[in-house]
Image: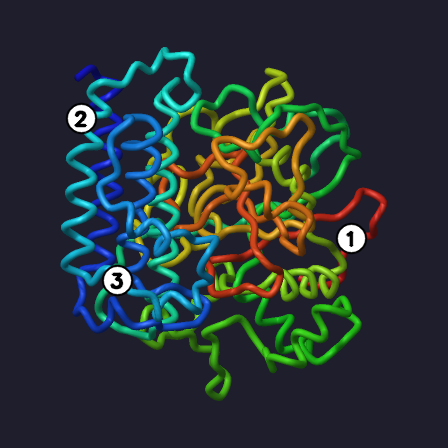
């Protein structure tokens, strides 16, 4: 097996280690549905194996199906999450045996792979990038499930660098064209393609994500009780849900507390805010005299290098992420302090755009010019044109293998169980805000 294939095998081993670590718990916790927003953890575990069987073994390897009778159970588009506990899904022990059996055959397919094949599933090992990224995405979903469960003591934490938040509040991005999306990154998804030129007017964008201290100022200024800051849908959501602060926040006297993986702690005011919906982010931006950036503004500020007239894979360049550049891969179970990664800044000087929190943008999830579904419509195409809003960047729970400047995530504007935050932008013609 050559170096390229050995790297893929190492990625497969690493992601499976995550999946098994996040399901190393008592069976009753794995089969329970902790929230109607999420699947039982054991469903996610078997689903990643079934997905791997479908795409690597059957589609790329031409291998006879191992367990065709379970395909329907793990079809995410046939069964909403709230209904999955009622399905006759595999139990924890059987799920582990199944995914282990799939993985042994997957490595055989990898050994036979020709990455220079004209077959788009084989070329550059795309099918392996597909399943590796898919499993990492489910691992992040598992972490969100554990957070909703309120179960303490199961999710590891770790150390992070201290913050260096001092510097300009905003960064100026000059007017001009840039290339959005990609035609060259081999493991990019269909919704990241095709690369196309976008010409933007000049704008300002926050150097750092919005922090807990700034967001607490919005809350304490009555932001949740003032309909001026909310669009009609957002105000209806706030009144219906009774939301008064980010999810998992409570107030005790003069102190804000949060529950993080089952343990209460004072809200660290120097961290990016997380667990806020698009509606909350939009309301804060209005209160601050700003707005959410479009995804084009976000991507230009993150990845464009005007001197080289090319996009970078990451804000700092094309070198792979490491712990000195971004908070990715669950080094700790929380965002890093604001200003913790000056070495990871983009060409324009914008920081922490990759890692820490997914960042809401103002944009709806729509196809790029020249979009073509690959390898199946249900990854992207069926979601275009709904009420989904685009998220960018990747959170502390996202793995480096599943993030880049062009990566597009999306969700409903009411969702806040995911590890979401945001930063603000403003047009050059807008006055400097009074708040913050």
In percent of the image, x 59 and y 78: which residue is there? 243
- Answer whether labels 3 and 1 touch (C-beta < 8 Å): no
* Along the viewing direction, whichever of 344 and 112 lies nearer the viewer: 112
Q: Position of residue 201 (x, y in %)?
A: 79, 34
Q: How is the image coloured?
A: rainbow
In percent of the image, x 29 and y 26: which residue is there? 62
In percent of the image, x 63 and y 48: which residue is there? 206
In percent of the image, x 39 and y 62: which residue is there? 144
Q: Residue 155, labelled with which disc? A: 3
Q: Residue 108, labelled with which disc? A: 2
Q: Quadrant of residue 368?
A: top right
147 vs 430: above or below: below
Q: Position of residue 384 (x, y in %)?
A: 64, 45
Residue 321 shows in this picture: yes
For label 1, the residue is 432
- What whole-number distance in Å separates the C-alpha atoms at marks 3 and 1? 42 Å
């Amino acid at each position: 097996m050559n170096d390229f294939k050995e790297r893929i095998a190492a990625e497969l081993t690493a992601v499976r280690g995550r999946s098994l670590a996040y399901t190393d718990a008592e069976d009753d916790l794995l089969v329970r549905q902790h929230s109607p927003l999420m699947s039982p953890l054991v469903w996610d575990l078997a689903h990643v194996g079934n997905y791997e069987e479908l795409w690597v073994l059957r589609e790329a390897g031409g291998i006879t199906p191992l367990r065709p009778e379970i395909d329907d159970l793990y079809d995410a588009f046939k069964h909403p999450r709230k209904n999955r506990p009622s399905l006759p899904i595999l139990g924890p022990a059987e799920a582990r045996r199944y995914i282990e059996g799939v993985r042994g055959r997957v490595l055989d397919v990898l050994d036979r792979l020709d990455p220079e094949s004209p077959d788009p599933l084989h070329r550059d090992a795309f099918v392996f990038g597909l399943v590796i990224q898919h499993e990492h995405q489910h691992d992040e979903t598992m972490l969100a499930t554990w957070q909703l469960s309120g179960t303490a003591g199961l999710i590891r934490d770790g150390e992070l660098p201290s913050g260096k938040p001092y510097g300009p509040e905003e960064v100026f991005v000059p007017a001009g064209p840039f290339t959005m999306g990609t035609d060259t990154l081999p493991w990019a998804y269909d919704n990241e393609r095709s690369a196309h030129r976008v010409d933007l007017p000049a704008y300002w964008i926050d150097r750092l994500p919005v922090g807990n201290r700034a967001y607490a100022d919005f809350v304490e200024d009555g932001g949740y009780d003032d309909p001026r800051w909310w669009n009609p849908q957002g105000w209806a959501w706030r009144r219906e849900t009774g939301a008064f602060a980010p999810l998992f926040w409570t107030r005790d006297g003069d102190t804000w507390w949060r529950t993080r993986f089952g343990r209460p702690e004072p809200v660290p005011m120097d961290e990016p805010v997380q667990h806020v919906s698009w509606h909350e982010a939009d309301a804060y931006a209005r209160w601050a005299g700003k707005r959410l950036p479009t995804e084009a503004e976000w991507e230009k500020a993150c990845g464009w290098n005007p001197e080289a007239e090319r996009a970078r894979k990451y804000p700092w360049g094309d070198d792979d992420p490491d712990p000195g550049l971004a908070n990715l891969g669950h080094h700790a179970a929380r965002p890093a302090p604001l200003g913790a990664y000056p070495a990871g800044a983009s060409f324009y000087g914008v920081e922490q755009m990759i890692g820490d929190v997914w960042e809401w943008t103002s944009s709806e999830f729509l196809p790029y010019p020249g979009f073509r579904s690959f390898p199946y419509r249900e990854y992207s195409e069926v979601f275009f044109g709904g009420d989904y809003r685009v998220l960018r960047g990747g959170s502390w729970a996202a793995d480096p293998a599943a993030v880049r400047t062009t990566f597009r995530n999306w969700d409903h504007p009411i969702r806040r169980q995911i590890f979401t935050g945001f930063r603000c932008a403003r047009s050059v013609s807008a006055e400097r805000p009074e708040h913050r």
